[in-house]
Image (cartoon, grey):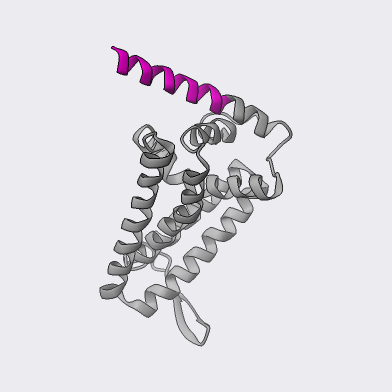
Amino acid sequence: MGKIGLFNLEDHFAFYGAYHSNPVNIAIHELFVWPIFFTLLIILYFIPPFFNLPSLEFSLWGNHVVLVWNLGFIVALIYAAYYVILDPKAGSLAALLCALCWIVASFLATQLGLSLAWKVVLVAQVVSWSAQFIGHGVFEKRAPALFDNLVQALVMAPFFVLLEALQILFGYEPYPGFQASVQAKIEANIEEWKEKKHKLITS
């Protein structure tokens, strides 16, 4: 609760929430944010490892899987660690999902091969990103957060949609008063944005 800057979950979530207040746009992001992260790990699987470490090999559903300690692993690890720091409870669940995404992405990458994997990833990325831009343009009527804070939007989005789902389904909040404080900041942010938009239109 006393974290600041990069680790201030309340401020980050309020920033995200200000761009995702429409129910349809929220639903679109719940469906398409994690696929972006997941398919990114698929294509990163084919980048050669940075470290000369032995790969981890095992069978999954009767198929041979090789886990490589490369960029995909590092990305998943950084995301997972950051989420746990932001909120140990929800962050641990997000970290588990990151690990599962990395394992299943590695499995699919080994099954598809690079020649087919990049095509699957390209289609998934285009569909996922297009859906989110439609959500913002048609329903939210506000540009995506990535135009104002690219890193915040790309790195924190998977955790935020998970946290949002936990709030909606179970009323979860990282600490008492979190949701009320975040909502107040969201409303202030939206009001400020509307005022700026009005000034641009009338000027």
Taking the spot 49% from the left edge, 38% from the top edge, the residue there is 20
x and y percentages locating residue 155 in the rendered image: 45, 45
x and y percentages locating residue 80 in the rendered image: 54, 53
Quarter that holds the N terminus: top right
x and y percentages locating residue 57 in the rendered image: 48, 79
Q: Is residue 160 above or below residue 191?
A: below
Regarding residue 67, the answer to whether it shows in the image is no
Magenta stretch in the rendered image: 185-203
Question: Residue placed farthest to the bottom in the image?
Answer: 62
Quarter that holds the C terminus: top left
The quadrant in which residue 175 appears is top right
Question: Residue placed farthest to the right in the image?
Answer: 176
Taking the spot 35% from the left edge, 45% from the top edge, the residue there is 133
Question: Residue placed farthest to the left in the image?
Answer: 115
The quadrant in which residue 8 appears is top right
Taking the spot 62% from the left edge, 55% from the top edge, the residue there is 93
Q: Nearer the viewer, residue 172 or 117?
A: 172
Regarding residue 113, the answer to whether it shows in the image is yes
Q: Is residue 18 above or below residue 69?
A: above
Q: Is residue 44 magenta?
A: no
- Provide the major secondary structure of the magenta segment: helix
Q: Is residue 198 magenta?
A: yes
Answer left or right for 72 relative to 95.
left
Q: Nearer the viewer, residue 70 or 24?
A: 24
x and y percentages locating residue 37 in the rendered image: 43, 56
Taking the spot 60% from the left edge, 25% from the top edge, the residue there is 184
Answer left or right for 197 relative to 15.
left
Answer left or right for 101 relative to 182.
left
Q: Is residue 69 above or below residue 28?
A: below
